């Protein structure tokens, strides 16, 4: 926790304008540590209890079975994925799931009006992304149009999945 407190001070003093939005994994790390301290439970146990219950999303994990992972190859070499589930940044992400569970989560959020943690893409269209060194995922929900989409990409830059999914869902939609 001391590491997070030291980093928080450095990030807070580097803000350019008061009130300006800045995404930060550090914020999630601090929130996760606070939740763990307040409840005495591990972050992922709280996620399972309050956000992604096992009975609705059985594949969600922080440590997927090695036989079920899709791993990218770069110049013929397998790239092992990052794991942040046991470090100080564990609450910033690092979840794995099947496409079925990811799509189920998107549909649930769309139908129930859940928007916490979602960013607005355009009028009444929201998205959430996750990016690691070699993989990225994006979920877009459009509640008014009753549409949602999920995309995953390997060895692409940040926002590649968002651009792909946005194009498929809206720009080429007839």
Image (cartoon, rainbow, N blue to C red):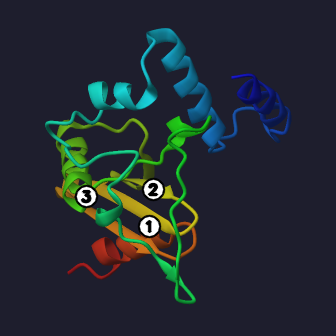
Q: From the viewer's side, name the closer residue of 11 and 88.
A: 88
Sequence-wise first label, 1 or 3:
3
Residue furthest toward the bottom?
75
- Is residue 161 depicted above or below 84 in this figure? below
On residue 162, the disc is 1
The residue positioned 37% from the left and 69% from the top of the image is 152
Nearer the observer: mark 1 or 3; the answer is: 3
Density class for disc 3 (Cα within 10 Å; few <14, some 14-19, many ≥20) is: some
From the viewer's perspective, is 51 left or right of 44? left
Is 105 or 172 nearer to us in this picture?
105
Q: Is residue 35 visible?
A: yes
**Marker disc for residue 129:** 2
Q: Residues within 10 Å of mark 1 (few under 14, many from 20)?
A: many
Circles 2 and 1: CB atoms closer than 8 Å: yes
Residue at 36% in and 25% down: 46
Going from the N terminus, do you reach mark 2 or mark 1 first?
2
Instruction: Report the mark closest to the observer, 3 or 2.
Output: 3
């Amino acid at each position: 926790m001391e590491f997070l407190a030291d980093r928080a001070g450095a990030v807070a003093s580097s803000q350019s304008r008061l009130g300006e939005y800045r995404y930060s994994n550090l914020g999630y790390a601090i929130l996760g540590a606070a939740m763990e301290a307040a409840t005495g439970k591990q972050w992922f146990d709280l996620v399972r209890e309050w956000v992604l219950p096992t009975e609705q999303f059985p594949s969600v994990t922080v440590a997927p079975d090695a036989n079920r992972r899709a791993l990218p190859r770069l110049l013929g070499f397998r790239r092992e994925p990052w794991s942040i589930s046991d470090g100080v940044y564990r609450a910033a992400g690092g979840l794995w799931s099947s496409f079925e569970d990811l799509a189920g989560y998107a549909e649930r959020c769309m139908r129930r009006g859940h928007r916490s943690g979602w960013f607005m893409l355009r009028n009444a269209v929201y998205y959430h992304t996750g990016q690691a060194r070699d993989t990225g995922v994006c979920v877009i929900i459009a509640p008014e149009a009753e549409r949602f989409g999920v995309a995953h990409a390997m060895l692409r830059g940040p926002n590649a999945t968002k651009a792909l999914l946005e194009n498929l869902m809206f720009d080429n939609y007839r």
